[in-house]
Amino acid sequence: MRKDIDTPANILASATHVNAFIMQQTGKLGCITEGAFADILIVEGDPLSDWRVMVDYQHNLKLIMKDGCYLQK
């Protein structure tokens, strides 16, 4: 598994701004900036130090924002 050979920071980067670059959507995806799509997940814990907070989403996911609007989880 990737978690066994890579850091949480690299895995999160691949899921966000690296994929945005590959899809030629830099500045629109994978970032939090004016003019970007407002898709955000808020989790309990620090995914940069413990990737499991992203995997155990039923306990750790606190907020979902899609296109700037709050969604019920």
Image (cartoon, grey):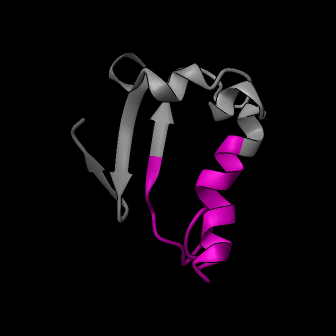
Position of residue 16 measured from the top left corner of the image (x, y, whole percent) = 61, 57
Quarter residue 46 falls in: top right
Residue 31 visible somewhere in the drawing: no
Q: Residue at x 29, y 49 (%)?
A: 70
Please, is residue 38 above or below residue 54 in the view?
below
Quarter residue 26 falls in: bottom right
Please, is residue 54 above or below residue 41 in the view?
above
Position of residue 45 measured from the top left corner of the image (x, y, whole percent) = 59, 20
Position of residue 19 measured from the top left corner of the image (x, y, whole percent) = 61, 65
Please, is residue 52 above or below residue 7 in the view?
above
Q: Which residue range is magenta in the image?
A: 11-40
Q: Residue at x 47, y 26 (%)?
A: 55
Residue 47 shown left or right of residue 48 in the figure: left
Quarter residue 3 falls in: top right
Q: Is residue 73 magenta?
A: no
Closest to the observer: 6 or 55? 6
Q: Given the current orientation, which residue lies at the most extreme left position?
A: 72
Residue 52 visible somewhere in the drawing: yes
Position of residue 56 measured from the top left corner of the image (x, y, whole percent) = 43, 20
Q: Given the current orientation, which residue lies at the most extreme top position?
A: 59
Q: Residue at x 76, y 44 (%)?
A: 10
